[in-house]
Image (cartoon, grey):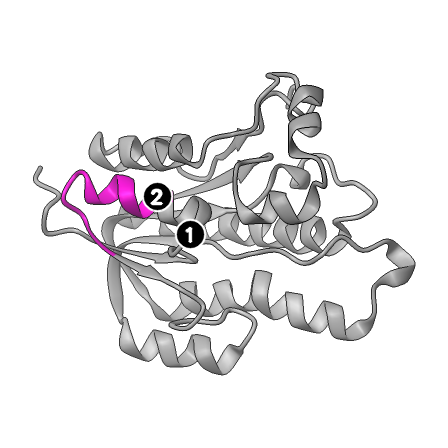
Amino acid sequence: MSLKFKKAIIIGGSKGLGKAISTSLKEIKVKTIACSRKEIDTSNISSVIKFCKKYREIDILVLNTGGPPPLKFNEINIEDWRKYFNQLFLSFFILLKNIKIKKNGYIFYISSSIIKEPGDSLIISSSLRSAMSSLLKSYSLEKSSQGITAINIAPGPFKTNRVKQLVKNLRRYEKSLPTKKIGNPKEIGEFVRFIVQKQIKYISGSTVYFDGNLNKSYN
């Protein structure tokens, strides 16, 4: 089946993992709408609602956004929770609720490998991304009869601005990783392209970890 008339919306598509996904989908003639924060600010619910009025339906939706700063438990305040609840959870719920995914379409949620092994500094991120991962699983069950495939992609450290903000010495950090190298965003872009191009459907509802074997758990 030709994909040249298919359309994709990539939230957070102007850089990093979102940009890599957009680039890869363009290579198979999917028309991509790669959105920056100027087009949709997921921390601003009014911005999200306005965006939904502009885009009513789509073939492929990629849910992707930046994360909160590292904070210890006692450093987090109520306003932090409110802001990032909007950015990492409520905004994505609104998008899923209001943008129709066409029959046999795809949803890719970019979460984080910390949903598998939460730490003591990215508490807001691990908590809200875990909640969103649960919501996506429920959504995938409800939409399975329509052939809609929902996949949770959980990256570890990749060469993005986010990692540069979190890691002071990138070269030293790379040497500490099991693979001795940090992830290339292109790999996630190529994974998404492969799933769409080959029309892989039986993976729906799954979480795929791209963490370079960083987490030691086998499940």
Please state the total of marks drawn on the protein image: 2
Element under disc 2: helix
Q: Quadrant of the N terminus?
A: top left
Residue 21 marker: 2
Q: Please rate how many residues cluster around mark 1, counting C-alpha atoms within 10 Å: few if below 14, some from 14 to 19, many from 20.
A: some
Element under disc 1: loop
**Image coords of residue 149 (percent x, y):** 34, 43
Task: Name the residue located 56 percent from the left edge and 68 percent from the top edge.
Answer: 90
Q: Does the magenta stretch include residue 22?
A: yes
Task: Name the residue located 65 percent from the left edge and 19 percent from the top edge.
Answer: 218
Location of residue 212 with respect to 93 vertically, above or below: above
Any part of residue 200 in sight: no
Location of residue 69 with respect to 196 vertically, above or below: below
Residue segment shown in magenta: 20-32
Marks 1 and 2, how far apart at CA = 10 Å
Q: Does the magenta stretch include residue 31?
A: yes
Foreground residue, 176 or 106? 176
Quarter location, residue 112: top right
**Image coords of residue 69 (percent x, y):** 71, 57
Task: Name the residue located 40 percent from the left edge and 38 percent from the top edge.
Answer: 204
Residue 15 marker: 1
Task: Name the residue located 60 percent from the left edge and 70 percent from the top edge.
Answer: 86
